[in-house]
């Protein structure tokens, strides 16, 4: 998930501040709004993950879709609060807790199923952020992964290396940081 967080941040870094708040139409969320929603979800789901319902009474999901944030600094603060809550909860989990039943809106599921649910939800929104940033930057976009028409070069470089046992994101995270 650190990879996906980093990809989003690299996409946002390419934007002017006002582009974070741009919306194509009234049915489209700006990047800032997507971030508010993700952070609200993270704070709700991961605060007291094992011992309280993942949809907290204090969460106002509908307000996450209102444009109330005014600066890049503020949106990044919200972004990091959500991610910090997520990473802290994940890091504290013990393997035996993965089969524990937790609740989201009174619907029971294993902790592992709830984690998987979020592992699909967050990259979904991160894809929206990256796609939106790409559209806003147009020809000024700098690719965050293998650039278009560069797959052969990338593969040649990879296959020129010794085989190794590591996570696929190890090299990508180094490049993105």
Image (cartoon, rainbow, N blue to C red):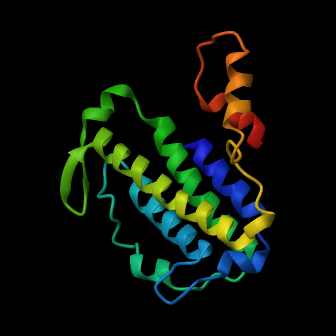
Query: On screen, 26 above or below 165?
Result: below
Specify whether 9 is left or right of 83: right
In this view, which residue lies farthest toward the top? 162
Residue nearest the observer in this picture, 100 or 61: 61
- Residue 153 visible at all: yes
Query: On screen, 61 above or below 26?
Result: above
Residue at image position (61%, 50%) is: 5
Q: State the image quarter where residue 54 is shown.
A: bottom left
Query: On screen, 115 above or below 171?
Result: below
Question: Quadrant of the image for the C terminus?
Answer: top right
Residue at image position (73%, 15%) is: 160
Q: Position of residue 108 (x, y in %)?
A: 19, 51
Residue nearest the observer in this picture, 164 or 174: 164
Q: Position of residue 138 (x, y in %)?
A: 73, 69
In this view, which residue lies farthest toward the left? 107
Specify whether 107 is left or right of 61: left
Residue nearest the observer in this picture, 153 or 134: 153
Q: Position of residue 109 (x, y in %)?
A: 21, 46
Q: Position of residue 142 (x, y in %)?
A: 77, 55
Specify whether 42 is left or right of 113: right
Question: Quadrant of the image for the N terminus?
Answer: top right
Query: On screen, 158 above or below 45?
Result: above
Residue at image position (64%, 56%) is: 8
């Amino acid at each position: 998930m650190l990879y996906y967080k980093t990809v989003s941040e690299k996409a946002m870094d390419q934007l002017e501040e006002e582009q974070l708040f741009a919306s194509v139409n009234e049915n489209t969320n700006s990047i800032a709004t997507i971030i508010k929603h993700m952070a609200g979800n993270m704070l709700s789901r991961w605060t007291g993950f094992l011992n309280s319902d993942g949809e907290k009474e204090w969460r106002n999901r509908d307000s996450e879709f209102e444009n109330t944030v005014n600066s890049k600094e503020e949106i990044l603060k919200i972004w990091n609060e959500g991610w910090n809550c997520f990473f802290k909860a994940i890091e504290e989990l013990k393997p035996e807790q993965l089969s524990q039943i937790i609740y989201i809106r009174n619907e029971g599921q294993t902790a592992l199923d709830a984690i998987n649910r979020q592992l699909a939800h967050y990259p979904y929104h991160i894809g929206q952020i990256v796609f939106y940033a790409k559209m806003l930057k147009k020809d000024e976009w700098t690719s965050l992964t293998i650039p278009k028409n560069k797959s052969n070069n990338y593969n040649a470089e990879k296959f020129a290396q010794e085989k190794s046992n590591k996570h696929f994101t190890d090299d990508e995270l180094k490049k993105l940081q």
